[in-house]
Image (spheres, rainbow, N blue to C red):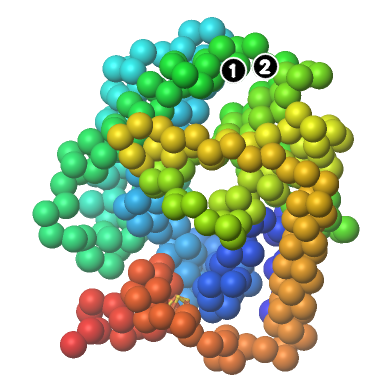
Amino acid sequence: MKRSFYTNSNGPTWSVSRDQQLQACERKYFFQYVAEAKINSPDPWLRGIALLKKLKNIPMWQGECVHLVIAEYLNQAHQKQAPKLDSLLLSLRQRMQREWDFSEKRRFREEPTAVGKTGVALFEHEYDEMPPETSVEALIEKAAKMIRAFHSWAEGESGLAEKVHTADRIWIEPPAWGIEAPGFMAGNVQVITKVDLALHHRGVSFTVYDWKTGKPPRESAEPSQNELQVSVYMLWANRGLKLPLEGVTSRLVYLGGDQAKELCFDLDEERAVETSRIIEDSVRLAQQWESYFEKRRLKLSDLDYAASVEECRRCNFKRVCRANLTPENEL
Ligand code: SF4
């Protein structure tokens, strides 16, 4: 088995989501990153895994559609032509209806390369596990409520539209890979920081935004995974763009309630060092783990299943990992 930590032509990479996968389930990490499954793999087992990698559950898909429509708003706001709410809602509705039709007809099985371009592959369709009473109209309406909350917040108290068109530099849903991708180096590893939006007002501020489609969390003394994520994003400004930490902030904007709720974070030197250490520890663990595969000291059958069977029931890879949990095999 070839080593797969090197997923980018520029060298090895690390991201918060990759770290989360390894912590949640080693087998899942294997299927996602180590198996080197491709849609055109000659091996049918690998082709099957490649298709399963593309599945999204309904909340993930709704969130992705909301993110894309927000990006439409931001791109036009940057040109000083912020679109009206009605046009955003129409765009959302058309996208979701088109993608739902593609998935409902299981067209992703014949056209896997269209997934992510013109269609989506929903977990619930692939596994025939659509909850009863699900309707695409209700799913669209739920996503539309988030867009209304975003639009009202962006045009109102947050002043976002103004900040967007006065920014000296702007990143709107930048690519995760390539020369334009935001990130910084931790040793020989590229840390990927795929922000939703970043605004740089030179000499004044650098602000990273992350849209969340759930409700805001309850207050907790412990930093959440979301806070770790935005801390890594703020490190990009400091380590990658060489900006002083003063003036760098981040905003988690929760769209899952009746109104948008914005939580603000900054990064002091102590927290920056702590975040760097978390990244280095995670990189070391992943590299060591993957080297065991490379040296054939570890194979799939050596890996534990996830701690909770419920986690497995919701997992894209259950057909190749725990087939007894798929509807066709369950008693
Ligand atoms: S089915 Fe369970 S054990 Fe297998 S990859 Fe998924 S979460 Fe992990």
Which numbered circle lies on residue 164? 1
- Measuring 53% from the left and 38% from the top, which residue is drawn there? 263
Q: Secondary structure at mark 2?
A: loop
- Measuring 74% from the left and 63% from the top, which residue is drawn there? 278
Tell me whether circle 1 and circle 2 mark residues in contact (CB < 8 Å).
Answer: yes
Residue at the limit of the structure toward the top, as seen here: 80
Q: Front-most of 133 and 212?
A: 212
Percent position of residue 105, x then y: 23, 52
Percent position of residue 65, x then y: 39, 38
Q: Amino acid at mark 1?
A: Val
Percent position of residue 36, x then y: 61, 68
Distance of label 1 from label 2 (alpha carbons): 5 Å
**Residue 246, visible in the rendered structure:** yes
Which numbered circle lies on residue 123? none
Left or right of residue 205: residue 63: left
Residue position marked by numbered label 2 in the rendering? 167
Left or right of residue 272: residue 33: left
- Ligand 1 sits in which quadrant? bottom left
| Above or below 192: residue 206 | above
| Above or below 288: residue 15 | above
